Image: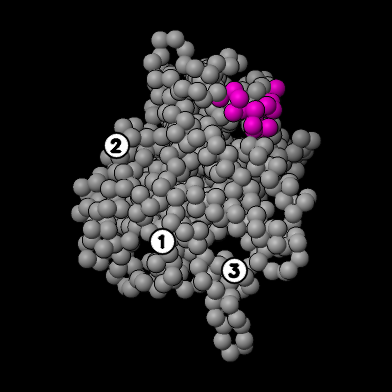
């Protein structure tokens, strides 16, 4: 029982939760979206700078959330920079699969995905906590909405 | 787990005489189950209370032996079901000491009861610019229906502020009542803080100015009971499932004179006297407000819950819960980094808290694995969370079946949270 808790609250997650990376509002962001989890009141705003060629040049976030949602948002901002929109979407799909399916496979097996998914593996513990999957995916859904042009999303 | 029923030595709370919580626990089948291999410690009764065997049996009997539709049919089952159904209405009347049983309207929930008043009374009586007074600590169910009416009618909502302890500022309340105030709608007790509001004073002050009052009793009635004649409120709403009864059933108490003046809420069967295509005449109260086949089994279950509570004795329950609150508050405050939200001198057995940097959601997940159920979130009171500038709190709520040992289990599990979050 406690092992599952340790899997969920790994040091990496606690570290990102306490000291989130890219926790800021970049002035030159050209895409942004806000996400809400109405169940717990968590809020996140994701800021992206996307080049005319469709490459994410900067990613950041602000908001308040639990250790899981903050760590997930923090890691996401580190991992999506330098990727094309298509690559980011594919990574999101793989991540979503990992959070929800026991026998998940990366949706797309390009080298980029595999490397990022290895880092995101620390969040796989949420599979044992179905009520917390939305915490792990909130920032990603919000980022996806920002890529699509920016809107307000809710996980419900 | 250390199953003690009295506070440990050295803790002076005033003992709860003659209340044997271990015996009471036997009435609740679910309390003997385990969660993740640990005894269930259910500290989420403010969200929904567990059900005693009496309620479960009454509902099973209703469905296996006495079930039919009510208020129709001449056959034995229909007559019996109708008798049981209307007997439950009388039980509710007795429980809240209403003058007449026709002042008891069955609704789907307390939320629907507020919506009924907003829709029927509100639409009939409110004009643009009229004011409704609510408070900073209201549940969304006592905010949103009025906001919807605001959009429709152009009424104005005035908010009674609270202080840092979570106590309603009564001076400010009195100042808010003006010539345009048409209704006061306040909670008996805060679901997020535990604050008990001085509802009798609230009603008296409003009535002195000729303003009717609706009291949201969802939490208050479970810990304090209510005597609606003594209270004097025009409307009092509560739900069945927080009172150890089933879900899907709520109650709107309304003074007969005020209900008489209100048009129907929904149209349909069971609420009409006669229907032709040209004209329909409606039944009297309360049936005018109960269109459609009601929640028959649930009403009977609610009646059983209230009978159970009256036998147990609300005063004894309240004393036990007061002891639990005092003990839990003292024990929790020993935990470094723990902050309690809602420290009003007058409060009932709800403790809302945060713990250091740990988000309430993380607290909830970690202690769940020790079998402990608390609520983590905004408690459907987001304006209140905004007041305290927190996104959420963890909330332990103590009910008639909780023990001092369970408080100890909660405290131990919170130390585990501190370990993980360093």
- Residue at image position (54%, 34%) is B312
The numbered dot on residue B164 is: 2
**Discs 1/2, front:** 1
Q: Chain of mark 1?
A: B
Q: Please determine if labels 3 and 1 lie on a single subunit.
A: yes
x then y, percent, for residue A12: 57, 24
Per the image, label 3 sits on a secondary structure element best described as loop
Q: What residue sits right under mark 1 in the picture?
A: B255
On screen, B223 above or below B265? Answer: above
Determine whether label 3 and label 1 are within 8 Å by CB. no
- Residue at image position (56%, 29%) is B401
x then y, percent, for residue B285: 50, 68
Q: Chain of mark 2?
A: B
x then y, percent, for residue A94: 70, 41
Position of the N terminus of chain B by quadrant: top right
Q: Please determine if labels 3 and 2 lie on a single subunit.
A: yes
Q: In the rendered structure, which segment of residues is drawn in magenta?
A: B21-37
**Discs 3/1, front:** 1
């Amino acid at each position: 029982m406690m092992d599952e808790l340790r899997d969920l609250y790994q040091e990496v997650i606690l570290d990102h939760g306490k000291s989130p990376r890219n926790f800021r509002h970049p002035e030159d962001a050209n895409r942004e979206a806000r996400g809400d989890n109405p169940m717990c009141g968590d809020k996140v705003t994701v800021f992206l700078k996307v080049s005319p060629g469709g490459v994410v040049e900067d990613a950041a976030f602000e908001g308040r959330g639990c250790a899981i949602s903050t760590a997930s948002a923090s890691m996401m901002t580190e991992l999506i920079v330098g990727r094309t929109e298509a690559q980011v979407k594919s990574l999101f799909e793989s991540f979503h699969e990992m959070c929800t399916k026991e026998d998940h496979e990366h949706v797309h097996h390009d080298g980029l995905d595999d490397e990022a998914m290895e880092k995101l593996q620390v969040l796989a513990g949420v599979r044992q906590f179905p009520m917390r999957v939305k915490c792990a995916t909130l920032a990603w859904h919000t980022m996806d909405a920002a890529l699509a042009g920016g809107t307000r999303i809710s996980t419900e | 787990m250390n199953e003690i029923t009295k506070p440990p030595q050295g803790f002076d709370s005033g003992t709860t005489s003659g209340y044997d919580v271990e015996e009471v626990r036997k009435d609740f089948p679910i309390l003997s189950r385990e969660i993740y291999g640990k005894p269930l410690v259910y500290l989420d009764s403010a969200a929904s209370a567990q059900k005693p065997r009496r309620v479960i049996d009454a509902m099973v009997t209703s469905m296996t032996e006495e079930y039919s539709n009510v208020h129709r049919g001449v056959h034995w089952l229909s007559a019996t079901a109708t008798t049981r159904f209307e007997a439950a209405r009388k039980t509710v009347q007795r429980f809240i000491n209403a003058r007449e049983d026709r002042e008891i309207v069955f609704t789907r929930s307390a939320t629907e009861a507020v919506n009924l008043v907003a829709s029927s009374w509100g639409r009939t009586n409110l004009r643009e610019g009229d004011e409704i007074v609510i408070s900073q600590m209201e549940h969304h169910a006592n905010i949103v229906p009025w906001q919807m009416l605001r959009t429709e009618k152009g009424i104005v909502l005035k908010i009674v502020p609270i202080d840092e302890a979570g106590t309603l500022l009564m001076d400010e309340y009195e100042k808010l009542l003006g010539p345009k105030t048409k209704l006061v709608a306040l909670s008996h007790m805060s679901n997020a803080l535990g604050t008990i509001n001085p509802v009798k004073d609230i009603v008296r002050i409003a009535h002195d100015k000729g303003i009717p009052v609706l009291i949201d009793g969802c939490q208050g009635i479970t810990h304090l009971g209510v005597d609606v004649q003594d209270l004097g409120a025009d409307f009092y709403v509560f739900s069945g499932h927080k009172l150890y009864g089933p879900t899907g059933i709520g109650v709107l108490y309304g003074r007969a004179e005020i209900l008489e003046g209100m048009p129907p809420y929904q149209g349909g069967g069971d609420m009409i006297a006669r229907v032709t295509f040209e004209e329909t005449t409606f039944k009297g109260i309360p049936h005018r407000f109960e269109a459609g086949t009601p929640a028959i089994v649930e009403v009977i279950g609610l009646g059983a819950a209230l009978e159970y509570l009256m036998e147990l004795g609300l005063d004894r329950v309240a004393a036990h819960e007061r002891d639990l609150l005092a003990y839990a508050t003292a024990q929790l405050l020993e935990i470094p980094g723990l902050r309690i939200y809602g420290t009003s001198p007058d409060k009932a057995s709800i403790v809302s808290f945060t713990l250091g940097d740990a988000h309430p959601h993380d607290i909830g997940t970690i202690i769940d694995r020790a079998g402990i159920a608390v609520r983590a979130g905004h408690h459907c009171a987001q304006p209140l969370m905004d007041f305290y500038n927190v996104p959420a709190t963890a909330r332990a709520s103590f009910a008639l079946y909780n023990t001092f040992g369970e408080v100890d289990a909660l405290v131990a599990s919170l130390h585990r949270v501190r370990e993980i979050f360093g």
